[in-house]
Structure formats: C-alpha cells, structure tokens
Image (spheres, coloured by chain):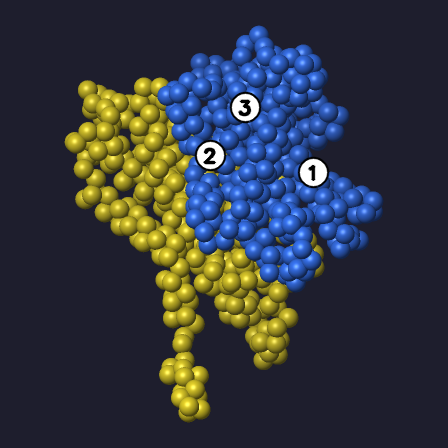
C-alpha cells in the first residue's frame, strides 16, 4: 500500500510538469500582450516596450519558462498584475472560500444523493423511484448557474429569506483559524457568525451540489439494484435481519465502491462548477477570481490559480483511489 | 403440440441488428421523448426565420423589459428585443456548437485513442499522459482559458469545447480497442495481409462504435451546457448574437426587476440538454445493456 501511494505520488510529477508547460504555453504564446493590456489603449509603444522589459516578456520563451519554473518551484508565483499583491497570498485568501463551498456542496450531494439513490432502488418502479429519477435527470440537465439564479429569484428576491450574494454579513467575520467561516465560528463559538455564514452558503451550496447529487443518486440506484438480487442479501433476509440492517449494512456497503469513485470525481467537477457558482453568487473564492483574472489577462494570477486547482484535482483523485482499498479489502495495489 | 412449439421457436425472418436496435430504442418511452424533442429543436433551428415572430436583433427601447404579453409571449429583453424570437434563433447556435464540438473531439479522440490502443508501447504512454495532463484541469476552466486566448466567437467556442473533450473520447476508444484487438477476426484480418490502417478503420472501429455513439450523444448535451456557460461568463459568442447563455449573462443584472429575462433562456438550455441526455441514455440501453 505504501509503495503504491509512493508510486502514484511519483507519477504526479510528470503530470504536474505537463500542467505547468500547458499553462505556460497557452497563456504566454497565444494571448494578447499583458504589458499592453496593463497600460491600456493610450500607452505609447515605448511605454509598452519598457514594461515588457521590466516584466521579462522580451526574453526568449525558453528563458521565460526556465525563470517561471524556477520561481514556482521556490513557491514564488509572482504578483497579480491587477492588485500588485503576491499571487500566492491572494490564493491563500481566496482559497478557503472555495474549499468551504466545495466541501459544503459535496456533503449535501453525498447525503441527498445516497438517500435518493437508496429510496429509488428499494422502492423500484414506484412513484418514489420515478420522482427521484426525474429529479436526478433534471439535476444533470440544468445549468448550475441558472439554478443559482432561480434560487436567488425565489429565496432572495421573492421571499427574502436568504442573502443573494457574499460569504458573510460585514463585520461578522469570525476570528481566523482555518479560513473556513463555518468551522471557525464553531471553534470560536461565535454563533452569530455561524448563522450568517450558514445563511450565505445555503443557496450557492445547493446550486453547486445539484449536478453531483443527481450523479450520485443515479450511481447509487444502479449499484444498489445490482447488489439487491445477490444471494447474500437473500441470506441476510432469511436469517431474520431487520430490513434496515439488510439495506444499509449489507446492500449499501457493498454498493459504495463505484459511488465513492463518483463522489471523488465530483470533487473535481465541483472545482470547475465553483467557477460558475461563485460568479453568480459573488462568492469571494478562487473560481470567481480566475474568471476576473482571465478577463483582465492577469497572467500570474491565472497561472497560479489554475496550477493550484489542477494540483488539488489530481490529489483528490489519488485520495479517492486509496479510499477504495479501505472500502473493499479485495482490492490490492501493487 | 410439438409442431406448434417448433413453429413458434423459429422466427419467420431473421431480425437485422438495426431493426432490433430501433425496436428497443422506440420501446424506451423516455428515449423516444428525447428523440422527438431533438427533432423539434432541429426543425425550429432550421426554420427559425419562418417561425420567429420578430427579428431577434430588432431593438425597440420602449418595449424594454416588457413582461410576457399576447404580442410578446415570453416578454422583451433589456433592449426591447423579443425573447421568444431570440430563443428560437439561439437553438441554431447551441445545436451547431454542440454537434460540431463533439465532431471535432470525436475525430481527434478516435484517432488518438485508436493509435494508443492498437500500437501500445511508447506511443500509448505518450498519448495517454498527454490526455492525463488535459484531464488534470476541470474542463470548463480549460475551455474558459482557451476562449480567453482565442477570443470570442462561435468557431472559437467550438474549438475550445472540442479540444477539452478530446481526452474523454480518446480514453473510451483506447479501452474499446484494447478489448477487441486480440479477437480472432482481427488476427485473421492481419493474417491475410491487411495494413494497420485498414485493420483499425475497417475491422476494429466499426466494432467499438456502440460506446462511442452513446458517449457522443451525451457529449452533445455537455457541449451545449459548456457553450451556455461560456456565454454566461461573457466569453462565448459576440453580442448581439442570440445565444442562450449570453442571454442569461445579460439578464443577470435584472434579477430584481425582470426575472423573466432569466427564466426562459435557462428553460431552453435545460430542455435541450434533457433531450440529449434522454436520447443518450436510451441509446446506451438499446445498444449495450452492459454499459449500465
């Protein structure tokens, strides 16, 4: 197991190097001149050229790539062209918001997805099954940003129950421990902050979770349907176990492996979905910042954020692979 | 009695593969609904100039943000343009990008996946590591980055969405090729002197089309979603082109005053994506029950 993890970690190196090359090539070779973008339309050619020299954009590409690689390996992602602050510092500020939203959404999606899937499988071909599966089908077909907008219209505009944007009410930010407001407010027992943070995260959380909930529900249903007719389930029933024990301990547990894979893959999808959800709800995370940075040709910021997102994406996939072996002792890695 | 049984057991005519597939597909009511909606959408897209009640680009400021009325069934947008007409014209963009992006991804993905699966070895390693690198990015993020680089426009959206979908198809094709390339008919084709290209394109690919067709149908729905997402973020087609995602993006500022600007384009995206998903699920069930 240890060897397998080590091997997978070593295999990450070429993939991550490839990620750095792709990001560099895409951003440096094909985009508009960042120096010209920064100075605006009225800048003279001399001014643009001076800034290009200052930023090192006049050097050959391989030199630029070497410098870029050297800096990144030393944890130096440069400074944002828009805010002039170090990119890593900005990522540090923005990232907890994205992680909090993604974790909240995956928790919602896992709970509701599995419950929906179990209900649909156990009550197969009843109104419950149809209702759940139609819901799941809508979940995969509805653009999450549109669902987000509908939630805003209903719960913020019409009913006025929940806020339409932001992460917490101004002035209620809890003391910094992890950067995740919900967790920090529990740790510091700041309940006013907790309620405000919870109210703010509900709508973006539901919007972001919708797609994953649907995928998890469909996967749970289909694997449950494969396990339910097995002999050992009949044996479990025959020996007089309670139906709930049969369903949750025998059927669900044996259906979980493909479901865990899907949940892991959804973590990645959530990072992508966060780009859209954060934009709709003005959620101050990395996703909305990436969009701003791309629109403003803020290369260092785009580079840094995209690399961080890709690294997390790849690591999450590795963690999912490792979790399988705990769920299914039959899986051995070599 | 025995004779009767015998007669019943022998079908009168052998059923062709396509007829069998079509029967199974049509029997699946959800798939049939998806197919009918898709046909209607294609008709709407093709005959948009005839069907649309107004010119989708005709701004009429006095009608700005009008709610649905008898004249304008779905109301008017911020520039007083008829929303129904814009949605009808928007079907052209969504369907075109969806189909063409998948066609691009398919053609590159099939070649890469077939080469990797058939030849194996170092070529396989290089191609699949490249695909892994592309899969290390959330696809919408990569598509956004490509759009930022390429600039707005329908062709660029097709290229961006097509490129980010390549790895999915390459992986499916590679897996399928690996599973059939050791079959006797492939060995036989090689033994009678067929070239590698002939073996791949004439003998292997036709036998691995089922999962590819299913994936491509479902891929159209994700391409339509991605197109709309790019439009929503302001990175899709250039205004004033009527495109559903761009309409949603433009309507975002009117969430308090005119929510109908957001309701209908979103509904159009959902129905279209739903239709392709239903059809894809139906195709999967009809073509290959093992894929469930």
| Depth check, front residue: B60 or B283 | B283
| Depth check, front residue: B125 or B280 | B280
State the residue lying farthest toward the front: A240
Give the mark nearer the N terminus: 2 vs 1. 2
Which chain letter matches label 1?
A: A
Label 2 belongs to which residue? A144
Q: Secondary structure at mark 1?
A: helix
- Is disc 3 surrounded by few (<14), some (14 to 19) or many (20+) residues within 10 Å? many
Q: Residue at x 35, y 37 (%)?
A: B267
Label 1 belongs to which residue? A315
State the residue lying farthest toward the right: A2
The colour assigned to chain B within the rendered structure: yellow
The colour assigned to chain A within the rendered structure: blue
Give the alpha-carbon distance from disc 3 to disc 2, as whole Å.
15 Å
Q: Secondary structure at mark 3?
A: helix
Give the alpha-carbon distance from disc 1 to disc 3, as whole Å.
25 Å
Q: Residue at x 67, y 35 (%)?
A: A311
- Image coordinates of residue A45 in percent, x first then y, are 50, 17
Q: Secondary structure at mark 2?
A: helix
| Depth check, front residue: A282 or B31 | B31
């Amino acid at each position: 197991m240890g060897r397998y993890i080590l091997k997978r970690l070593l295999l990450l190196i070429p993939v991550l190097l490839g990620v750095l090359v792709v990001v560099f090539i895409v951003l440096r070779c094909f985009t508009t001149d960042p120096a010209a973008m920064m100075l605006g339309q009225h800048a003279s050619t001399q001014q643009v050229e001076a800034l290009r020299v200052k930023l090192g954009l006049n050097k050959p590409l391989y030199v630029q790539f070497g410098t870029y690689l050297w800096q990144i390996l030393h944890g130096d992602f440069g400074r944002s062209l828009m805010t002039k602050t170090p990119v890593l510092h900005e990522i540090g500020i923005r990232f907890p918001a994205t992680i909090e939203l993604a974790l909240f959404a995956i928790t919602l999606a896992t709970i509701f997805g599995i419950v929906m899937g179990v209900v649909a499988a156990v009550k197969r071909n009843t109104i419950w099954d149809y209702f759940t599966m139609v819901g799941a089908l809508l979940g995969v077909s509805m653009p999450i940003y549109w669902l987000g907008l509908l939630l805003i219209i209903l719960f913020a505009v019409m009913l006025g129950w929940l806020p339409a944007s932001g992460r917490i009410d101004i002035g209620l930010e809890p003391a910094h421990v992890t950067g995740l407001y919900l967790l920090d407010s529990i740790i510091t027992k700041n309940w006013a902050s907790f309620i405000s943070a919870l109210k703010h995260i509900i709508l973006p959380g539901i919007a972001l979770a919708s797609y994953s909930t649907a995928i998890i529900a469909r996967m749970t249903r289909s694997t449950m349907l494969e396990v339910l007719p097995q002999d050992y389930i009949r044996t479990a029933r025959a020996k007089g176990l309670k139906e709930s024990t049969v369903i949750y301990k025998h059927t669900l547990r044996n259906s979980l492996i493909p479901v865990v894979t899907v949940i892991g893959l959804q973590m990645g999808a959530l990072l992508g979905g966060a780009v859209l959800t954060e934009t709709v709800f003005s959620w101050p995370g990395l996703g909305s910042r990436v969009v701003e940075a791309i629109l403003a040709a803020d290369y260092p910021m785009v580079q840094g954020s995209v690399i961080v997102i890709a690294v997390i994406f790849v690591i999450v996939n590795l963690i999912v692979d490792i979790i399988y072996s705990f769920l299914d002792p039959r899986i051995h890695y070599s | 009695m025995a004779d009767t049984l015998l007669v019943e057991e022998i079908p009168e005519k052998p059923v062709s593969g396509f007829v069998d597939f079509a029967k199974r597909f049509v029997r699946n009511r959800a798939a049939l609904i998806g197919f009918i909606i898709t046909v209607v959408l294609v008709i709407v897209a093709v005959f948009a100039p005839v069907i649309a009640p107004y010119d989708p680009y005709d701004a009429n400021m006095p009608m700005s943000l009008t709610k649905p009325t008898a004249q304008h069934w779905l109301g008017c947008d911020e520039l007083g343009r008829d929303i129904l007409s814009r949605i009808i014209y928007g079907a052209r963009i969504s369907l075109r990008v969806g189909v063409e992006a998948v066609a691009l991804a398919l053609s590159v993905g099939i070649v890469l996946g077939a080469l990797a699966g058939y030849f194996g070895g170092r070529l396989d390693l290089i191609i699949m590591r490249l695909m892994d690198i592309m899969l290390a990015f959330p696809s919408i993020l990569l598509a956004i980055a490509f759009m930022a680089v390429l600039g707005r426009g329908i062709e660029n959206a097709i290229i961006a969405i097509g490129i980010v979908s390549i790895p999915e198809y390459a992986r499916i094709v590679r897996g399928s090729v690996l599973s059939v390339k050791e079959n006797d008919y492939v060995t036989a084709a090689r033994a009678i002197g067929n070239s590698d290209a002939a073996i791949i394109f004439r003998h292997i690919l036709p036998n691995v089309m089922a999962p590819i067709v299913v994936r491509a149908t479902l891929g159209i729905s994700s391409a339509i979603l991605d197109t709309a997402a790019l439009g929503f973020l302001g990175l899709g087609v250039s205004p004033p082109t009527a495109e559903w995602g761009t309409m949603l993006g433009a309507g975002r500022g009117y969430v308090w005053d005119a929510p109908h600007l957001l309701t209908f384009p979103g509904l159009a995206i959902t129905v279209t994506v739903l239709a392709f998903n239903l059809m894809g699920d139906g195709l999967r069930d009809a073509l290959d029950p093992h894929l469930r």
